[in-house]
């Protein structure tokens, strides 16, 4: 029948489901909730003023005496977990990072303070030597100082993990990328009766330029004399998907409870592949550089901060992350 109204003959018009806010909400497939988010926190000694971190607007190094209050606020606002990173006085750093095994080192006092003040909040501690070594590497160097020694480092990480767990950490999170450390840490925890402490493994952690602001925050960059400290002999080559699959499979076999991909935004393909290949929960770490670049562009007036933030997290969730470590978590309190 001829008609004077022009219309294409389209049985499927995708725009029908986008016509109103209510319709868009109804068909929305992915949602980021506060309960998905983990806030990383930087901790320093004392009870003074929090220190701003220039390259990470809105993030601070929090004095130990103020940490419990910050954590209570996050927990009351619906954030289920925090990841603690100590920034040590440079005088405590040595090539062997002995301070990591001090039974009263800053991060252990931080864990105890948080669990005392806010027992429901999950506490994740980083198991790696970079806050403690004068060279800023995640492990112990060989005699010639040319590379990080794997097996000797793992024995230190085992002890660190046990100390963290004894202090009350719910998750220990090896971020060092040594071979065999997940299995070794599981064994050490179990032998110490710490069978209930979980392991969140930084399984696919890439040698990324996006860690720059973090290294400023914890002082591992200054220690090494450069923000671009090379960790290429242990962190994954950003070019390699298959190696990421092998790394995550190994950590799963060795007993990891949660597998992590890091960074997140530039590695959405890796997150998706991992989500499709494991039944374990998948975590993704939206790292300091991802946070910094959104803030920097927003400061210049080039991007809308909130919309870019929300879209970046949505994309990570849509790629398959069950939980996201993000410095933006504190923006999502209910
Ligand atoms: C170190 C560690 C790093 C981050 C978390 N743990 C940096 C590194 O590997 O040098 C980076 C986190 C971020 O950039 O937000 N073990």
Image (tube, rainbow, N blue to C red):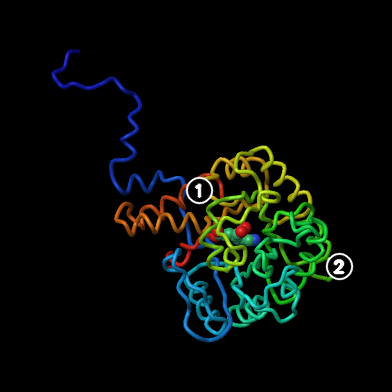
Residue drawn at x 31%, y 35% is 15
* Label at residue 265: 1
Q: Give the residue pinned by disc 2.
A: 191
Q: Is residue 129 above or below residue 249?
A: below
Locate the C terminus and report the quarter of the image it occupies: bottom left
Residue 282 or residue 11, whichever sits in front: 282
- Residue at image coords 61%, 50%: 207
Of the two numbered discs 1 and 2 on the same chain, state the one appearing first in sequence: 2
Alpha-carbon span between mark 1 and mark 2: 37 Å
Q: Which quadrant holds the N terminus?
A: top left
Label 1 CB sits under 8 Å from any ligand 1 atom = no
Figure quarter occupied by ligand 1: bottom right
The image quarter in which residue 189 lies = bottom right
- Judging depth in this view, the residue of 312 and 231 nearest the camera is 231
* Residue 104, x across and y down, in percent: 71, 82
Q: Is residue 264 visible to us here?
A: yes
């Amino acid at each position: 029948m001829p008609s004077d109204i022009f219309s294409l003959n389209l049985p499927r018009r995708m725009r029908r489901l986008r016509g109103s806010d209510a319709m868009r909400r109804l068909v929305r497939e992915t949602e980021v909730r506060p309960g998905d988010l983990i806030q990383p926190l930087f901790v320093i000694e004392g009870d003074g003023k929090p220190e701003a971190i220039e390259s990470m607007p809105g993030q601070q190094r929090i004095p130990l005496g103020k940490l419990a209050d910050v954590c209570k606020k996050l927990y009351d606002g619906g954030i289920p977990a925090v990841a603690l990173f100590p920034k040590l006085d440079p005088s405590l750093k040595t090539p062997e990072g002995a301070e990591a095994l001090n039974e009263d080192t800053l991060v252990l006092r931080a864990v105890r303070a948080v669990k005392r003040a806010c027992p429901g909040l999950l506490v994740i501690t980083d198991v790696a030597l970079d806050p403690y070594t004068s060279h800023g590497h995640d492990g112990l160097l060989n005699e010639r100082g040319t590379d990080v020694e794997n097996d000797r480092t793992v024995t230190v990480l085992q002890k660190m993990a046990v100390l963290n767990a004894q202090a009350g950490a719910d998750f220990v999170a090896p971020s060092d990328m040594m071979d065999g450390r997940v299995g070794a840490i599981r064994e050490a925890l179990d032998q110490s009766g710490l069978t209930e402490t979980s392991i969140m493994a930084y399984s696919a952690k890439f040698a990324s330029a996006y860690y720059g602001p973090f290294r400023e925050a914890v002082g591992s960059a200054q220690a090494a004399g450069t923000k671009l400290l090379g960790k290429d002999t242990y962190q994954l080559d950003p070019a390699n998907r298959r190696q990421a699959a092998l790394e995550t499979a190994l950590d799963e076999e060795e007993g990891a409870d949660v597998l992590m991909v890091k960074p997140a935004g530039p590695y959405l393909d890796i997150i998706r592949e991992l989500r499709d290949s494991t039944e374990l929960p998948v975590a993704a770490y939206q790292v300091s550089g991802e946070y910094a670049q959104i803030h920097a562009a927003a400061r210049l007036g080039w991007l809308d901060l909130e919309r870019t933030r929300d879209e970046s997290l949505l994309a990570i969730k849509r790629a398959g992350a069950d939980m996201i470590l993000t410095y933006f978590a504190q923006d999502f309190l209910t």
